[in-house]
């Protein structure tokens, strides 16, 4: 068994799709703006796990997303090979980071805002 699709709530799937593709570098797997459908994948593994940019609307998801964000918790974690290099790249594109690099037992990590209501954690891992 493997994970083929997961989702993250976003305040606007169209805006999120632009951020996740143009800034983060993901590729569109499915994109139907009229249906508010946006699914992206990593260009490093186009047949791997897909990420649905799920519209939160004004439902329970909005409250959930806001509480997670306000608690300073990441909505999802992305792995990179060189965290310092990726942070530099993203900052040059205007991405807002929350804190400095954090050294934890298994590597380095940092949080940034996805401009769609979420905090995303970058985690430096070998073979990301």
Image (tube, helix red, strand yellow):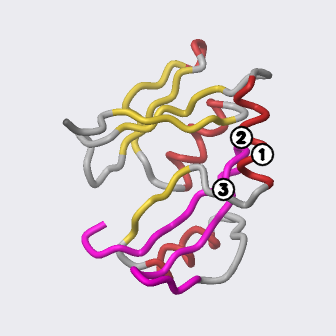
> Alpha carbon of mark 2 to alpha carbon of mark 1: how far?
6 Å
* Furthest-top residue in this view: 35
Quarter of the figure that contains the C terminus: bottom left
Q: Is residue 39 magenta?
A: no
Which of these two is toward me, 94 or 87? 87
Q: What element carries label 2?
A: helix
For the point 43% across and 48% down, the residue is: 26
**Residue 49, placed above or below residue 59:** below
Q: Which mark is residue 119?
A: 3
Q: What stretch is highlighted in magenta?
A: 102-128
Marks 1, 3: nearer the viewer: 1
Q: Residue 67 carries which label?
A: 1
Q: In which quarter of the image is residue 6?
A: top left
Q: Residue furthest left?
A: 1
Q: Earlier in the sequence, mark 2 or mark 3?
A: 2
Left or right relative to 72: residue 51: left
Question: Dot 2 corresponds to which residue?
Answer: 65
- Residue positioned 63% across, 67% down in the render: 111
Q: Where is residue 93 in the image (x, y as percent from the top left)?
A: 63, 65
Mark 1 lies on a secondary structure that is helix
Report x, y in % for residue 32: 51, 19
Q: Position of residue 119 (x, y in %)?
A: 66, 56
Q: Which residue is drawn at 60% across and 19% down?
A: 36
Q: Does the magenta stretch include residue 104?
A: yes
Q: Residues within 10 Å of mark 1 (few under 14, many from 20)?
A: few
- Please report the residue visible at 70 percent of the width from the left and 31 percent of the height from the top: 12
Q: Residues within 10 Å of mark 3 (few under 14, many from 20)?
A: many
Q: Nearer the viewer, mark 2 or mark 3?
A: 2
Of the image marks 1 and 3, the number of the one nearer the N terminus:
1
Mark 1–mark 3 Cα distance, whole angstroms, equals 11 Å
Asked whether the residues under the numbered discs 2 and 1 touch, taking CB atoms below 8 Å apart as contact, a structural biologist would say yes
Locate residue 41: give its quadrant.
Answer: top left
């Amino acid at each position: 068994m493997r994970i083929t699709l997961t989702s993250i709530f976003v305040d606007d799937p169209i805006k999120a799709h632009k951020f996740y593709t143009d800034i983060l570098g993901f590729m569109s797997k499915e994109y139907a703006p009229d249906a508010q459908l946006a699914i992206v994948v990593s260009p490093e593994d186009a047949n791997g796990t897909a990420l649905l940019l799920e519209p939160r609307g004004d439902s329970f998801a909005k409250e959930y997303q806001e509480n997670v964000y306000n608690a300073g918790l990441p909505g999802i974690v992305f792995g990179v090979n060189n965290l310092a290099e990726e942070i530099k790249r993203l900052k040059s594109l205007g991405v807002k980071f929350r804190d400095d690099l954090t050294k934890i037992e298994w590597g380095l990590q940092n949080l940034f805002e996805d401009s769609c209501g979420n905090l995303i954690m970058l985690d430096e891992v070998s073979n990301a």
